[in-house]
Amino acid sequence: MTTPYAPCRPPQEGYSELPQMAHEGGNMSGDRIGEILSELREMRQEGQDTREKVITLIEQAKGIVDHEDRLRSLERWKYGLPVTGLVAIGSMALSAWAKTGGS
C-alpha cells in the first residue's frame, strides 16, 4: 500500500517532520512545493512573532496596577487625614501651651 506522501529530500533545519508531497499524477512541480514550503516558513515566523508579542503583552499586563487597588489605597490615605489633622492640632496646642509656661 502506497501513500501520496513520500519524502523527496531530508528535512531542513527546524523542520523535523515536514513531508514533501509527491502527487501521484505528477502535477506537483518542484516550484509549487517550494512555494508551499516558503508559505509554511512565513506562517511559522508569523506564529513565532505573534507568540513573542503575546508574551510581551502578558509581561506588560503584570505591571499594570489594578484599578480597585488604586482606589483602596486612595481611600486609606483619605480616611487617615482627619486623624492626622487632629494630631497636628493637638501638637500645636501642646507646643503653644509649653511656650507660655505650661500654666
Image: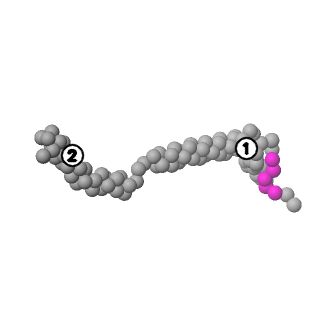
The image shows residue 66 at horizontal and vertical percentages of: 40, 54
Residue type at the position of mark 2: Ser
The image shows residue 25 at horizontal and vertical percentages of: 77, 52
Dividing the image into 4 quarters, which one contains the N terminus? Answer: bottom right
The span picked out in magenta is: 3-7
In this picture, residue 12 sits left or right of residue 73: right
- Residue at which label 1 appears: 15
Residue type at the position of mark 1: Tyr
Q: Residue at x 60, y 44 (%)?
A: 48
The image shows residue 11 at horizontal and vertical percentages of: 77, 42
Q: Disc 2 on helix, strand or loop?
A: helix
- Residue at which label 2 appears: 91
The image shows residue 56 at horizontal and vertical percentages of: 51, 44
Q: Residue at x 12, y 46 (%)?
A: 103
Q: Residue at x 46, y 49 (%)?
A: 61
Question: Which tag, 1 or 2, sits closer to the chain's start?
Answer: 1
